[in-house]
Image (cartoon, grey):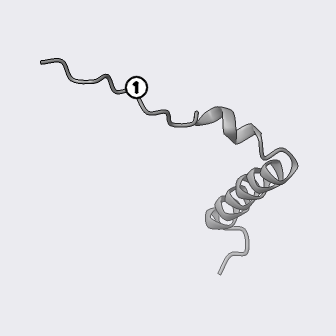
Amino acid sequence: MRLLKSDLYRNIALGFVVGTGLAMFQIAPELGADAVPAARAAPMDAPTR
């Protein structure tokens, strides 16, 4: 069994990316608010006959 397999590097990189994302969310949670705007309903006009 080799200690340094490609799976080890992949898991370290994945952990780094996930950890960085969590740290950024904890530091500045309002950054995600601009990525997905709030939903707004379209105004509904009265039907005309």
Query: Residue 33 in the image: x percent, y percent?
Result: 68, 38
Q: Quadrant of the N terminus?
A: bottom right
Q: Residue placed farthest to the left in the image?
A: 49
In the rendered view, tell whether residue 7 sits above or below residue 23: below
> Which one is nearer the viewer's eye here, 15 or 12?
15
Instruction: Report which quarter residue 10 is drawn in.
Output: bottom right
On the image, the x and y values in percent for residue 31 come to 75, 38
Q: Which residue is at the front of the view, 5 or 43?
A: 43
Residue at position x 87%, y 49% in the image = 27
In this view, which residue lies farthest toward the bottom?
Answer: 1
Which amino acid lies under the numbered mark 1 shown in the image of this protein? Pro
10 Å crowding of disc 1: few (<14), some (14-19), many (20+): few
Q: Which residue is mark 1?
A: 43
Q: Is 45 situated above or below 32?
A: above
Question: Which quadrant holds residue 36?
Answer: top right
Rendered image quadrant of residue 28: top right
13 and 47: which one is in front?
A: 47
Q: Decide if residue 8 is on the left or right side of residue 22.
A: left
The outermost residue toward the top is 48
* Residue at the extreme front of the image, as rendered: 49
Q: Tell me: residue 24, above or below residue 40.
A: below
Can you say whether 27 is above or below 10 in the image? Answer: above
Quadrant, the C terminus: top left
Residue at 72% in and 61% down: 15
Residue at x-position 77% and y-position 41% = 30
Residue shown at 27% from the left, 24% from the top: 46
Number of marks in the rendered image = 1
Q: Which residue is at the front of the view, 19 or 43?
A: 43
Q: Secondary structure at mark 1?
A: loop
